[in-house]
């Protein structure tokens, strides 16, 4: 299928919320990792989301260039070219972008989509995250509202975050523990501000104890009931149509029970990065340890070209990451739910 268009993406999210499942939203930084996601989703019969972070974009543009928007465009172009070889829908998204990086990441990507639309071509990305969670709520929502107006004209969806996800991702370190739990008052204010700017869906990363990265069991104290409280409050006050599409950040290492409870309360997108990184690297590490005298030229020997050809271990890594994507689709109950475009 080609990359999902706006109505398809909206239909995906709506269906996930109605049927209590979530799409794996997997961070990618290269052709190999993007291909792994498409392959894993296709083998699961799951639609899904491919996303690029600021650091992922900078990496993908090349170590000598380090242009995060350029790298994100490059990955998105690749996905647009290969997606129709896979029988599933995929949406393209960009991950955490703080206010100071909007000018160098999200806005150039929005401009690129606007240029494409003017030329009658599909959007480059389907949605972008603005992470104003470090700002006071009012400032966060002021920026979000102005972005949303521009986004809606280009059929782009906005993801925002209130509260603060703990841990560290891409060098963005969260602050103290007090804001790890979003309140219904905060999310009600989000719904009011977003509703004032239009009716298109938006994604909300509300925090309920989630932490970026993986910690030992017991470190993460998730309280998915917070999502239910927020969802109940908004539906009671503003009606069912105002219900949230929640995003689960920092879920690596969570108990499956907590994940499923979160899906029941309206999580439709779950970001998975750390576990995918490990799956990819684990396969390469195994190859290198098992064939160390092939990947290295030891004691004047010549090694083994087949072992050190990057395709050998990157193919193993792609396969391993695709398998981890399949596991995510099963855990998030999106396996077998792929929409067929009408
Ligand atoms: Zn995140």
Image (cartoon, rainbow, N blue to C red):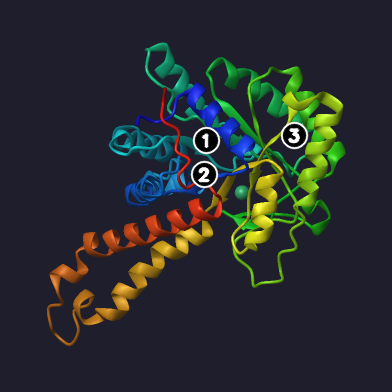
Which quadrant of the rendered structure holds the N terminus? top left
Q: Residues within 10 Å of mark 1 (few under 14, many from 20)?
A: many
Check residue 239 in the rendering and tell me which mark sits there, or answer none.
none
Q: Which residue is mark 2?
A: 54
Left or right, 76 with reference to 269: left
Q: Mark 2 Cα within 10 Å, few/some/many (few <14, many 20+)?
A: many
The residue positioned 55% from the left and 27% from the top of the image is 10
Tell me whether circle 2 and circle 3 mark residues in contact (CB < 8 Å): no
- Judge by depth and name the residue closer to the eye, 66 or 35: 35
Q: What residue is pinned by disc 3? A: 140
Q: Quadrant of the C terminus?
A: top left
Which residue corresponds to mark 1?
105
Residue 200 drawn above or below residue 267: above
Q: Which mark is first along the chain, 1 or 3?
A: 1
Vertical placement of residue 226 versus 16, above or below: below
Mark 1 touching mark 2, by CB under 8 A? yes
Determine the CA span between mark 1 and mark 2. 7 Å
Q: What x and y, as percent, mark residue 79? A: 35, 37
Question: Quarter-wise, where is residue 209 in the image?
Answer: bottom right
The correct choice, above or below, for 50 with respect to 244 in the image is below
Q: x and y percent of residue 70 in the render?
A: 41, 36
Question: N-terminal of the two: label 1 or label 2?
Answer: 2
């Amino acid at each position: 299928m080609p990359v999902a268009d706006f109505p398809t993406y909206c239909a995906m999210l709506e269906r996930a919320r109605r049927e209590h499942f979530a799409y794996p939203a997997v961070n990618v930084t290269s052709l190999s990792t993007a291909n792994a996601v498409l392959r894993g989703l296709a083998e699961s019969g799951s639609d899904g989301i491919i996303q690029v972070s600021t650091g992922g974009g900078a990496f993908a543009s090349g170590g000598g260039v380090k242009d995060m928007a350029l790298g994100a465009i490059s990955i998105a172009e690749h996905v647009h070219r290969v997606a129709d070889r896979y029988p599933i829908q995929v949406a393209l998204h960009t991950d955490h972008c703080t206010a100071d990086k909007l000018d160098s990441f999200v806005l150039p990507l929005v401009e690129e989509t606007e240029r494409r639309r003017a030329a009658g071509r599909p959007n480059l990305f389907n949605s972008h995250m603005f992470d104003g969670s470090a700002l006071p709520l009012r400032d966060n929502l002021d920026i979000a509202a102005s972005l949303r107006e521009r986004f809606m004209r280009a059929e782009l969806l906005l993801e925002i975050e209130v509260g603060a996800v703990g841990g560290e991702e891409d060098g963005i370190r969260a602050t103290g523990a007090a804001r790890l739990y979003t309140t219904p008052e905060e999310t009600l204010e989000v719904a009011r501000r977003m509703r004032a700017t239009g009716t298109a869906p938006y994604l909300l990363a509300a925090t309920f104890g989630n932490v970026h990265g993986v910690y030992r069991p017991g470190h993460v104290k998730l309280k998915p009931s917070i999502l239910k409280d927020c969802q109940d409050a908004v539906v009671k006050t503003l009606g069912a149509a105002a219900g949230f599409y929640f995003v689960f950040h920092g879920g690596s290492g969570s108990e499956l029970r907590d994940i499923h409870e979160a899906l029941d309360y309206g999580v439709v997108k779950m970001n998975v990065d750390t576990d995918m990184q490990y799956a990819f690297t684990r396969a390469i590490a195994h190859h290198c340890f098992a064939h160390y005298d092939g990947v290295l030229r030891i004691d004047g020997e010549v090694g083994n070209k087949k072992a050190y050809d990057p395709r050998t271990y990157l193919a193993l890594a792609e396969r391993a990451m695709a398998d981890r994507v399949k596991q995510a689709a099963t855990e998030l109950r999106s396996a077998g739910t792929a929409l067929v475009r009408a």
